[in-house]
Amino acid sequence: MTTLFDPIQIRGVEIPNRVWMSPMCTYTADPQSGEAGKPNDFHYAHYTARAAGGLGLVMVEATGITPEGRISPYDLGIWADGQIGGFARIAQGIRDGGAVPGIQLAHAGRKASGHRPWARFGSADAESPEGEEDYSWLPVSPSATAFPGSPVPHELTRTEIAEVVQAFAEATKRAEAAGFDVIEIHAAHGYLLHSFLSPIANERTDEYGGSPENRARIVLEVIDAVRAVWPVDKPVFLRVSTTDWVEENVGDFREAWTLPQTVELARRAAQRGVDLIDCSSGGIDVVPIPHAEDYQTRNAAAVRAESGVLTAAVGRISTPEQANGLIAHEKADAIFLGRPLLRNPSWANDAALELGTSPRFIDQYAYAL
Ligand SMILES: Cc1cc2nc3c(=O)[nH]c(=O)nc-3n(C[C@H](O)[C@H](O)[C@H](O)COP(=O)(O)O)c2cc1C
């Protein structure tokens, strides 16, 4: 029986256990031009502390492949070579803590150009006091259909779609130069790639819209572009929204992205070199989401069982027993933790102690045993 603290080998990378840090935006980059997108001391301390807390893998937050691909001006970005150095320091720091360094590459699409979540009307963020022109831009999307509360986006031309695909490849090269071992392509939560997958946001009539195959085209192109420049011995993960929660919403008859479509995408993504599907959900529209503890992890189990592809579960995993059960009962191959790691950077070491296995303390913390 496989357990939470067993290693997992994916291509040439051995990940020491199956408790991983889920990508979480910290909205802490300096938005001023010249510094925009670059990690700083906060990011270094944040990620290295969690690596030292015993995790198998630390996934750096959604990182913009272009300036327009950021959720807010405070997001990390990897669209320029000058940004590589700060990421290299973090990747090495994560490795020094004993974890595998990964980075999520993202384009926020029609949900870009927002404020930090904690910005309140009238706050400095909301008023964009300096360099106002740098603080907002017109978001882009497959169609000129707005996310509720956001501006109507610019509909991408085919040439612009090709540029987005190329930007994923360029960002991947920089992530490799920075020393990351895992790339995660962000195709979830209503951001650009998900908005192509879902007919809620994609009303195109060309080869990027219509059938599920056409809607998945850009995702497969991005996978090909990433794989073409990323070392063959390093893993590529794909984070998807396994459902839009529209089909499950009684009385909502709109066509949407569904679990069976995710299973098919998982199969096709794996054929093109994706190693693991990171199973999240929702984000394309404002719809009710179930409250059950396993609301999302059960979709990870379904994708794993039906596609045969390695799968990570995420969402409302709170106890070591619950996390271990997902692995032991073959519902997932690894788990990602989000909010629990904001509360406790040493969640993994605490869980190892609770489950009766050896925690992984760095030398400086060895007295914690
Ligand atoms: C503050 C915050 C920032 C997040 N940023 C990202 C992100 O950058 N990329 C992503 O795919 N998901 C992001 N998420 C979602 C988390 O990765 C995770 O999937 C979600 O919080 C559910 O897991 P949890 O119940 O363990 O928190 C974020 C969540 C939070 C709370």
Image (cartoon, rainbow, N blue to C red):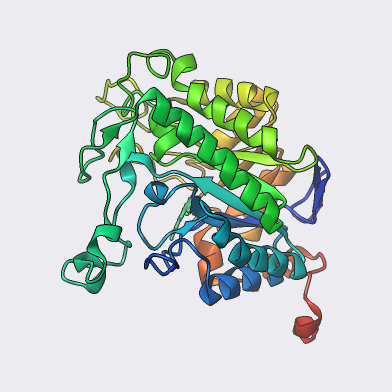
State whether residue 242 appears in this view: no
Image quadrant assignment for residue 321? bottom right
Q: Residue at x 28, y 40 (%)?
A: 286
Q: Is residue 231 left or right of residue 209?
A: right
State whether residue 91 appears in this view: yes
Image quadrant assignment for residue 239? top right
Q: Name the quadrant of the N terminus.
A: top right
Q: Residue at x 65, y 71 (%)?
A: 48
Q: Name the quadrant of the C terminus.
A: bottom right
Above or below residue 171? Residue 275 is above
Above or below residue 171? Residue 350 is below
Q: Residue furthest left?
A: 122
Instruction: Report x, y in % for residue 241.
Output: 47, 36
Above or below residue 54? Residue 104 is above
Q: Residue at x 40, y 40 (%)?
A: 191
Instruction: Report x, y in % for residue 304.
Output: 65, 31
Q: Nearer the viewer, residue 44 or 178?
A: 178
Q: Residue furthest bottom?
A: 367
Instruction: Report x, y in % for residue 129.
Output: 22, 71
Instruction: Report x, y in % for residue 75.
Output: 43, 59
Above or below residue 212? Residue 123 is below
Q: Nearer the viewer, residue 122 or 155?
A: 155
Q: Is residue 108 left or right of residue 42?
A: left
Q: Is residue 196 left or right of residue 367?
A: left
Image quadrant assignment for residue 313? top right
